[in-house]
Each structure stands twice: as C-alpha cells, then as structure tokens.
Amino acid sequence: MSEGQKGRHGGVKQIESRENKTFKRLNGLKNRRNREKEGLFLAEGERFVSEIPKGEGVEYFVLSETFCETHDTAQYEAAAKTLLLPDVLFDMLCDTETPQGVLAVCKKLEWQEDEVFRRDKPFLLLAENLQDPGNLGTVIRTADACGADAVFLSKGSVDLYNPKVLRATMGSFFHIPVFQNVSLEETAGKLRKKGIPLYAAHLRGEDMPYALNLQNACAFLIGNEGRGLSEKGAALCSQWVRIPMPGHAESLNASVAAAVLLYETVRQRISGNISNI
C-alpha cells in the first residue's frame, strides 16, 4: 500500500506478521474452544457482513490489502476498529477457498428465551443432534424465511458459530433467535406449561402435517440426519407426524423435512385453512 493509500485509510491499523498477538488471537477463533472462551466469532464475506445490524457487536472489521485498493473502507472505519492485513495473512483467517477480502470479528449474539415464549402464537423449531453444518445453516435460513420465532438446538449439535453453518444461513443468523446446547427435556417442559404442542417429524407418525391445526402456537422437533429422532426425543412430543413419501426414498434430508413442516405452517396461517388430505 502506498503512502497515499495509508493516508486515505488513516483509521486502519496494519498487521504485517503472523506473529502479531492480535492476528494470533483472531486466527484462534477458527477453533470452537477459542470461540467459546472469547465469546467471539468470525463473519466472513461482504454479504454476510452487510447483514450485521448496524454493525452492532463488531469488535473488529478485518480487510485485505486487495480489498482496500478497490473499495471505500470509510463505512468500516466509522463503525468499528479496522485491521488491514496482507492478502496472505487475511486468507489464513478465512474458511472459504476464495475469500472476498472482508470479515468481521463479532461478539456472540444474546437472545432472551423468555421473550420468545411471551410472543403471540409462538412458532418454533427444535432440532436434536444435527451434525451437518450445511443442514443446520439451511434450517436456520428456512426458519427465518417462514417467520418462525426461534430455533432450539440440542446439546451435541454442530456448533452454531461454525463458519460453514454461518455461511449457509445467508445472513438469517442475525434475524432469528437461535439457542444452542439446550436441554430438550427442559424446553419441552416449557412448551407443555405454555400449552404449545410439540410435533415430532417421525416415520411412524399416523397423521400428516396438513391435518394439524398450525394456526395457533406450535413447535416441531426434527432429528439427526442419519438416525432421525432418538426414542427419548420422540417421547417428549405430544404427537408424531409423517411427511408423505410416495416414492422409494426411505427418508428426507433433515433440512428438507424441516422446510415441509415450516411451510405448511406458513400456508395455514396465510390461507386460514387446514387441509383434509
């Protein structure tokens, strides 16, 4: 970067070495244990960074030299401390093969569970032991698109702040409350106290989702991608529902099953009709 460019980006602190303490700290955030210890995570890419509500909770914006040469960085400098890295160091922080040159170091989001349960006709999705980052990210994105009030992830699920999960949400991560490491037993107990039915997506279900009344408060529980719901998880539910599969496949992808259930809720709430299928 030329002296003129340094002046134009006067609010940017340059890091030149991988031995820099700040760089080491940020590089450590690729590890789940460090993310949990620091209470921070990395949001990578222009679109994802642009979804951060007014830059709230951002500790640093991190930019590559190439990005600074082709973009006006004033918006980043005005919102938070901004770091400039040589491309080779910036790429080391990224999970993608072709980094876009911008990422944000963010504080983990804090949502209030009580606020979710106080909402009118809560519409919730629970997941047991989801392991695939892409599946979880898609589930969160779909729940956001359907206007669900929250997603609850059981202990043993993939880390919510895994970079692949975050990218798959396409920014929905910032729009919908997601609670991880929850006790399904405790959450199911709260649902019962509120009179909210918990439906299990289950191959042995006798009723199809189209026959349920989903216009009032409701919650769905979906299981692990390979094993489905555990017997313990299924026993927590007030009713099992079966998604019809007239073809030869034995089961659906977890994110697809979630989408079918979520969109049936949307259909009923928009149309005001329950199907007799």
Image: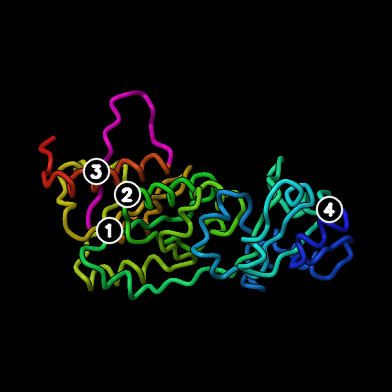
Q: Nearer the viewer, mark 2 or mark 3?
A: 2
Mark earlier in primary sequence (2, 3): 2
Mark 4–mark 1 CB contact (< 8 Å): no
Reading the image, the residue beneath label 1 is 123
Q: Position of residue 87 (x, y in %)?
A: 81, 49
* Residue type marked 1: Phe
Q: Which residues are magenta?
A: 237-253
Is 268 positioned to the left or the right of 54 in the image?
Answer: left
Per the rendering, the mark at residue 264 is: 3
Query: Sequence-wise, which precedes: disc 2 or disc 4?
Result: 4
Which residue is rendered at x = 32% and y = 49% of the image? 146
User: Mark 4 falls on what kind of element?
Assistant: loop
Q: Nearer the viewer, residue 196 or 86?
A: 86
Among the two numbered marks 3 and 1 on one chain, the one whose residue lies closer to the N terminus = 1
**215 or 96, nearer to the observer:** 96
Give whichever of discs 1 and 2 has the lower sequence position.
Answer: 1
- Cα distance, mark 1 to mark 2? 10 Å
**Spatial distance from mark 2 to mark 3, Cα to Cα?**
10 Å
Which quarter of the rendered picture does the C terminus lie within? top left
Q: In screen coordinates, is 107 left or right of 266?
A: right
Rounded to the nearest angstrom, the CA distance separating label 3 from label 4 is: 49 Å
> Dot 3: what SS?
helix
> Looking at the image, do the residues carrying marks 1 and 2 touch, with CB atoms under 8 Å apart?
yes
- Residue tagged by mark 4? 86
The answer to whether mark 3 and mark 4 are in CB contact below 8 A is no
From the image, tell me which residue sits under label 2: 146
Residue 84 placement (x, y as % from top left): 78, 59
The mark lying in front, picked from 2 and 4, is 4
The amino acid marked with disc number 3 is Glu
- Look at the image and say whether residue 244 sits in the magenta stretch: yes
Looking at the picture, which amino acid does disc 4 mark? Answer: Pro
- Looking at the image, residue 270 lies above or below residue 51: above
